[in-house]
Amino acid sequence: MSTNGLKSVEVEKDLGIMITSDLKCTQQCEYAYSNANRVMGMIRRTITYKEPRIMLSLYKTLVRPYVEYCCCAWNPSYKKDKELLEKIQHRFTKMIINMWEKTHEERLKMGLWTLEERRNRQDIIDVFTMYRGYSSVALQELFEMDTNSKGTRGLSCKLKKVRCTRDIARFFSNRVINHHYHLLLRQKAAHKN
């Protein structure tokens, strides 16, 4: 019988995601940023005619996957991490012909969303697929339905938010509830009009 114990580690990389002992995603954001930055440098050096259609295709296929890969597992909650990832999109859109002097909001009108909007959208899509039974993960495994008729404002599929510490609140099953609730309210208002 072996008496070897398990070693304690600060960071472990699993399926391309950096998992730290404190479960914060700062190192994963830095890792994604450096990889995306490396690809952006390669594009800057090799592409001479930086026309919007070509550059957007390159961005969506070569750069953005680095900052979105498995983001439901490591979605950043700290402002500095979100800003670090957004820098990638800011810098890339400036590389496009005639876009240097425009504001970031004007550059996004080319058909891009902010990365945070994309992460929030993906969270909502994940909840929807669980709710409809299209996912291998059942909704009941991560969420509890809110049956309190006063707190649901007439919504039939409101998820119950569990009280937790601030560090746990950033995980999928807690962070998605606010986005889900606001989406349901918007849908209800749209049906009334």
Image: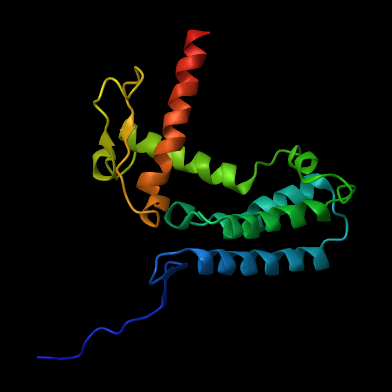
Q: Which residue is drawn at 77% across and 45% down?
A: 104
Q: How many marks?
A: 0
Quadrant hosting residue 9 = bottom left
Colour style of the rendered protein structure: rainbow
Q: Residue at x 73, y 63 (%)?
A: 40
Q: Is 27 placed above or below 101 here?
A: below
Q: Which residue is drawn at 58% across and 55% down?
A: 79
Q: Which residue lies furthest to the top in this view?
A: 193
Q: Residue 88 at what x, y percent from top left?
A: 69, 58
Q: Is 11 placed above or below 174 here?
A: below
Residue 166 vs residue 10, the one in the foreground: 166
Q: Is 166 placed above or below 143 here?
A: below
Q: Residue 159 at what x, y percent from top left?
A: 32, 33
Quadrant hosting residue 83 = bottom right
Q: Is residue 6 left or right of residue 114?
A: left
Q: Residue 174 at what x, y percent from top left?
A: 37, 45
Q: Is 131 placed above or below 186 here?
A: below
Instruction: Give the quarter of the figure containing the N terminus.
Output: bottom left
Q: Residue 12 at what x, y percent from top left?
A: 41, 75
Residue 58 vs residue 165, the one in the foreground: 165
